[in-house]
RNA sequence: CGGGGCGUAGCGCAGCCUGGUAGCGCAUCUGCUUUGGGAGCAGAGGGUCGGGAGUUCAAAUCUCCCCGCCCCGACCA
C-alpha cells in the first residue's frame, strides 16, 4: 500500500491485511471477491458466479484428465439406506458422527402453527444423505461385476455431499460441498495400487500445472487415513500462513468394501474372488487452496489457466471525442482478444474512475489489466499490468506495466499470461521452500512450529509418538512423502529407528 | 459442546454506561462537473434498533428469557 502519510484509519474499502489476521483476510477475500456468501443455513454457503466459474474451470480440466485415463462419469443417488453405512465397520465409525438423516417424506400442519414432518410419513428405514458414496456405489458394483471381463471398472461422479461438521469455513469445510469421487474395481491389488498412484499423480499435476500450487505427494499415517481404507495417499499444499491443506486424496480400499458389499468376479479359472478397489476425490476445498496460496492484500489472485476472465480492459478518456475514440479502440481490442480464445471484459461503466476500476478488478483477481487511453490510441498500443509481477520490479516501480502494440495484442497477452502462471507457481514453490525445515530436535520443533511451515522430521512409525506431537503442538503428520530421500535416522520424539522423514505441520 | 465476539438502513459502524422515540461513512437514486491508481458538489430515498416478556409516563438504551451469526478449540476433505 502506497497511500498517503500514515493513514491512521484503515480505508474500509481495503481488506484485512494477511499479516494482521489471516483468517479474516481469507474471509474478506472470499466475500469481497464475491466467490461465495453465507447461506441462511448454518455451515452452508452459496457459491456465487465468480466462485462457480472457478469450479467449472477446475471441473473441466480435471474431467478431461479423468476421461483421458479411461474413466467414465455416472451418477448415484443422494440418499443411501441407513443400513448400508453399517456394513463396513471402520467406515461407519468414521462417518456416523456427521451424517444427516432423512426420516420423513412429507410435511403436515403443526399443532402450534406452521409445518412439521407429518408423523404418519415416517420412513420405514431412514435414509442417510451421502457423506461419500462408497456404500451405495459398491452395492451396485456387486450387481454389475460378475467376471474378470467386467474389470477394471473405472467410474467417477461429480456430486454434492453432506458432512455435518462442527465447525465450518467458507470453501475449506462446509456442511454441504461439491466434489468429485472416483471409484474403481480391479482384479489385483497390484493393479488397484497403481490406480491409486496414477490418480494421485493426476491430482498433483492438476494442482501444479493448473492451480499453480506445488504439492507434496505422500501416504497418510494410519490415524489420518480414510475410514475403511488400507492406505490413504494425499497431496498436501502449503498456505501462506505456513499451514498445510490436504488438497486431494486417493485411497487404496483393498478388499474391505468388496467383502462388505460382496463385490466379486470369476477369474479365468472360474474361481470367485473379491475385487480390489480404490476411491479418490477432490472438492470445492481446492478453491480455498487457490485463494490461500496466491492471493494478497489487494485481493484475489486467479491463475490464468483457471480464470474465466483473463483480462479486463479499462478505458480512459477526458472528453466525448476522446471517449468515442478510446471506446472504439477498446471494443475492437476486445473482439480481437475474444477471437483468439481469451476471456475479456471491457469495463465501460460510466462515472467510475479508472483508479476505482483498477482496485476492483484487482480485488476480483483478474490476471491482467489492459489500459487504453488517448495516448495509447494515438500510439496504437495499450498498457498491460499483470495482477502480480512476473519478474522483479525495477527501482521506483510500484507495479509492473508494459506497453503492448494493439496489432500483436493476442500473442503478447498470451505470453504474459503464461509468464504469470509460471510466476505464481514459482512464487508458491519458493514460499514453501523457505518455510520447510529439517529438524531432529523435538524441543526446537516445539518452539519453531509456532511460526508455521513444514517440518521434515524422523518418526518411528508409532501412533503414540504421533499422538504426543499432536497433543503438545497441534501439528500432525501431513504425509510420508513419496519423492524424498530414504535417509534413515532416529525418531524425533522417542529416538526409535526411522526409515525416512515425515512431514509435520499444522493443518486446516 | 467449551471459550471469545457480534446482532441498529444494502454494507461497515456510532449511540447504550448516565432512558426522552435514531445518527455517521460507504453504497443506491437525480442533476451538473469529472475520469492515466479508490472523483467533487448539491439534493433524495431507505430502519417494526435479532425476537419475546418485564420495569417505566417513556426502552436501541435497564432486567430476564430465547434466537441467530462470526472467530478460536475438540472432529473432519
Image (cartoon, coloured by chain):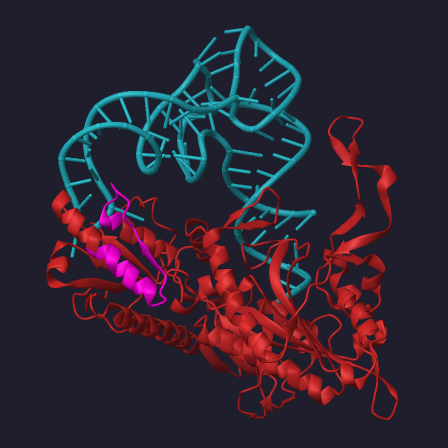
- Left or right, A6 with respect to A188, comes to left
Give the percent coordinates (x, y) of residue A406: 20, 65
Say if residue A356 shows up in the picture. Answer: yes
> Magenta stretch containing residue A333, yes or no?
yes
In this rendering, the answer to whether A283 lies above or below A66 is above
Q: Residue at x 35, y 63 (%)?
A: A310
Which chain identifier belongs to the cyan chain? B
The residue that appears at 25% across and 55% down in the rendered structure is A331
Chain A colour is: red
Of residues A360 and B26, which is closer to you in this image?
A: A360
- Residue A77, percent across and down? 73, 59
Give A207 or A43, whichever is nearer the viewer: A207
Image quarter where the N terminus of chain A lies is bottom left
Q: Describe residue B27's horizontal placement relative to residue A286 as left or right.
A: left
The quadrant where residue A257 appears: bottom right
Residue A460 occupies which quadrant of the picture? bottom right
Left or right of residue A411, residue A375 in this image: left
Q: Quadrant of residue A332?
A: bottom left
Residue A392, given in percent of the width and then of the height, sits at: 25, 73
**x then y, percent, for residue A15:** 37, 51
Does A161 appear above or below B62? below
Q: Nearer the viewer, residue A15 or A198?
A: A198
In the image, which residues are magenta? A329-356
Magenta stretch: includes residue A139: no
Tally of numbered tags: 0
Amino acid at each position: 500500500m502506497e497511500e498517503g502519510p500514515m493513514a491512521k484509519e484503515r480505508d474500509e474499502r481495503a481488506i484485512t491485511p494477511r499479516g494482521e489476521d489471516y483468517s479474516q483476510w481469507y474471509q474478506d477475500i472470499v466475500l469481497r471477491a464475491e466467490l461465495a456468501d453465507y447461506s441462511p443455513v448454518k455451515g452452508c454457503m452459496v457459491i456465487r458466479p465468480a466462485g462457480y466459474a472457478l469450479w467449472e474451470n477446475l471441473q473441466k480440466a480435471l474431467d478431461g484428465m479423468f476421461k483421458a485415463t479411461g474413466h467414465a462419469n455416472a451418477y448415484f443417488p443422494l440418499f443411501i439406506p441407513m443400513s448400508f453405512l453399517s456394513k463396513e465397520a471402520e467406515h461407519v465409525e468414521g462417518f456416523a458422527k456427521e451424517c444427516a438423516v432423512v426420516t420423513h417424506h412429507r410435511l403436515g400442519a403443526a399443532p402450534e402453527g406452521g409445518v412439521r414432518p407429518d408423523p404418519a410419513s415416517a420412513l420405514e428405514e431412514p435414509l442417510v444423505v451421502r457423506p461419500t458414496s462408497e456404500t451405495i456405489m459398491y452395492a451396485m458394483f456387486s450387481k454389475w461385476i460378475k467376471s474378470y471381463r467386467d474389470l477394471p471398472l473405472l467410474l467417477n461422479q461429480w456430486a454434492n455431499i453432506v458432512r455435518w461438521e462442527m465447525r465450518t469455513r467458507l470453501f475449506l469445510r462446509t456442511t454441504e460441498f461439491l466434489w468429485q469421487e472416483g471409484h474403481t474395481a480391479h482384479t489385483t491389488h497390484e493393479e488397484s495400487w497403481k490406480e491409486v498412484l496414477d490418480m494421485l499423480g493426476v491430482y498433483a499435476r492438476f494442482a501444479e500445472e493448473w492451480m499453480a500450487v506445488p504439492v507434496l505427494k505422500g501416504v497418510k499415517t494410519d490415524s489420518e487415513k480414510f475410514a475403511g481404507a488400507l492406505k490413504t495417499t494425499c497431496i498436501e499444499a502449503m498456505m501462506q500462513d505456513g499451514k498445510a491443506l490436504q488438497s486431494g486424496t486417493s485411497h487404496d480400499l483393498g478388499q474391505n468394501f468388496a467383502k462388505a458389499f460382496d463385490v466379486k468376479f470369476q477369474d479365468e479359472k472360474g474361481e470367485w474372488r473379491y475385487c480390489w478397489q480404490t476411491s479418490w476425490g477432490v472438492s470445492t476445498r481446492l478453491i480455498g487452496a487457490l485463494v490461500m496460496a496466491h492471493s494478497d492484500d489487494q485481493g484475489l489472485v486467479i491463475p490464468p489457466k483457471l480464470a474465466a476472465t483473463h483480462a479486463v480492459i479499462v478505458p480512459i478518456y477526458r472528453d466525448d471525442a476522446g471517449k468515442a475514440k478510446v471506446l472504439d479502440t477498446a471494443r475492437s481490442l476486445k473482439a480481437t482478444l475474444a477471437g483468439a480464445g481469451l476471456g475479456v471484459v471491457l469495463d465501460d461503466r460510466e462515472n467510475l474512475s479508472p483508479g476505482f476500476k483498477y482496485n476492483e478488478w484487482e480485488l476480483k483477481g483478474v490476471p491482467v489489466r489492459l489500459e487504453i487511453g488517448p495516448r495509447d490510441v494515438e500510439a496504437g498500443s495499450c498498457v498491460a499490468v499483470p495482477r502480480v509481477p512476473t519478474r522483479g520490479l525495477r527501482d521506483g516501480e510500484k507495479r509492473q506495466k508494459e506497453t503492448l502494440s494493439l496489432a500483436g495484442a493476442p500473442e503478447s497477452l498470451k505470453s504474459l499470461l503464461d509468464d504469470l502462471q509460471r510466476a505464481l507457481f514459482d512464487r508458491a514453490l519458493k514460499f514453501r521452500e523457505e518455510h520447510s525445515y529439517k529438524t531432529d530436535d523435538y524441543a526446537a520443533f516445539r518452539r519453531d512450529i509456532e511460526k508455521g511451515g513444514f517440518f521434515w522430521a524422523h518418526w518411528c512409525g508409532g501412533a503414540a509418538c504421533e499422538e504426543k506431537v499432536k497433543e503438545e503442538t497441534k501439528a500432525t503428520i501431513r504425509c510420508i512423502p513419496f519423492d524424498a530421500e530414504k535417509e534413515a535416522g532416529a525418531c524425533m520424539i522417542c529416538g526409535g529407528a526411522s526409515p525416512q522423514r515425515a512431514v509435520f505441520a499444522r493443518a486446516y
